[in-house]
Every structure is written in C-alpha cells, then in structure tokens.
Image (tube, rainbow, N blue to C red):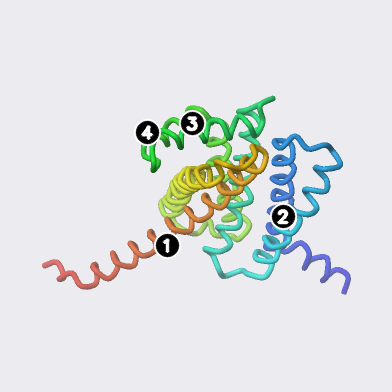
Amino acid sequence: MMLLQWRETLRPDRCEAGICGALVIGQALFLAYLLRLSVIESMLFALLVGLPVALACYGLLARSNDRCRMDLLVVMFATGGFGMLLGCVADFGPLRLYGLLGICRSLSNDVYWPGPTQLWLMIRLMPWACVGMLAGGILGMAAFDALRHRQAKPAARRIGQYVVCNVGMLLGMVICEHVVTRITTGLSQGVAGALTVAGMLVGMTLGMSAMLALAARASMVGRVVGRMAPPRT
C-alpha cells in the first residue's frame, strides 16, 4: 500500500504540478525583491500571494491529464513568468521595479497603442526579461512534452506550437503592460509597478491562449477546406 502511494505521488502530472507550484512561489519572491521588501515581508508576500496561486496551478495540473491546452497554459505561466521576473532582476539591478515602471511609462507616453516600434524598444530595453520569458516558456513546454510522453507528435508540429505560444506571450505581455501602465498613472510607484508586473503575467497567459485558439481554428478550417477540395486527377 505504501509503495502504491509513493508511486502515486511520483506520477508525471503530480511532479509537473509540484515544479510549477515551486516556480510560482519563486515568482512571488522575485517580485518581493523588485518591490524592495524585507526578508520577513518577502516571506509573508510569498505566503499570502504566491502560495494561493501556486496551489491553484498545482490543482489544475494534478487533476488533469487530457486538457492539453489548459495544462500548457499553466506550465507556460509558471516557467515563462519565472524567466521573465528573473530577467527583470538582471535588467534593472538596483533600480528594481522603478526601472521597469520608468521604461513602461516612457513607452506608453509615446503612442496610444503599442506597435512594432514599441515592441522592439521593449526588447532592447528589457532584453533579459524578454529572453528569460521566451527561454523559460520553451524549456517548460519541452519538459511538459517529455513528462507527458508527447514526443510522439511530429517535431514540426511541436516546434510550431512553441513558436505560436512564444509569439502570443510576447504580444500579450506588451499589450497588457501598455494598458495597465496607462490605467495606473495616478497611483504610487510601488503599487503601479506591482500591478504592471501582474498585468504582464496575465497578458502573456491571455496572449498564449488567444494564439493557441487561433492556431486551432486555422488548423480546423484548413482540414475542412482540404476535405472540400476536389480530388486530384
């Protein structure tokens, strides 16, 4: 009986869920560092903010083996968000969240809606945050496929899925950052910075979800058109 319980705790979905939960706690600690919180305040922040989100991610992953898109979004949120916040620590150094907020506000003041120029400027001004988000997302998806034994899917299909998710993450992050920065103009720097980071994390998740839905719809339309096409002679 104990052996069966031990094997149950080591199921791939439970292992993956535990790793994602730990990465979400890491996100909370990085954000606490960027907010210049003390050690005790950081622990409380991780407990009150990071732990509920980590438990939600764990629950979504541990209960499901077949909801591929939902699982993928949770994994990408955990790994991509961890990489993004780690990159923010590297990008802004002693400026911490105030450096991020200054860049976001300067970009949002230039135009009403972000375009390719603003996207490129953000990549240049926050290189490690963008690289960390994309690298974390790719590694997370690769580990997700490995733990769920989905390597049997064609390599081209898996790479295409990785590209779609990363494009969605980047676009969603930039758009939500721009919107949240405009909304929080009158707030204090600490609150505005924390909301900006939260908006970036939510934006990358929504961007991934939107791009995956569009890719699935385009694939479905392509299959329907292919069936309707006249046979070759």
Task: Give amino acid for label 1.
Answer: Ala
Question: Disc 3 or disc 4, which is closer to the eye?
Answer: 3
**What's the distance in space between the residues labelled 4 and 1, CA to CA?**
26 Å
Residue lying farthest bottom? 1
Q: Earlier in the sequence, mark 4 or mark 1?
A: 4
Residue found at x 68% / y 53%: 20
**What's the distance in space between the residues labelled 1 and 2, CA to CA?**
25 Å
Question: Disc 4 or disc 2, which is closer to the eye?
Answer: 4
Viewer-nearest residue: 66 or 179: 179
**What's the distance in space between the residues labelled 3 and 1, CA to CA?**
32 Å
Q: Residue 148 is drawn in which quadrant?
A: bottom right
Task: Give amino acid for label 3.
Answer: Ser
**What's the distance in space between the residues labelled 3 and 2, CA to CA?**
34 Å
Residue tagged 2: 21
Residue tagged 3: 106
Q: Position of residue 183 (x, y in %)?
A: 52, 47
Q: Are marks 3 and 4 in contact (CB under 8 Å)?
A: no
Question: Disc 3 or disc 1, which is closer to the eye?
Answer: 3
Q: Position of residue 36 (x, y in %)?
A: 75, 34
Residue tagged 1: 213
Q: Residues within 10 Å of mark 2 (few under 14, many from 20)?
A: many
Viewer-nearest residue: 2 or 61: 61
Residue found at x 76% / y 55%: 51
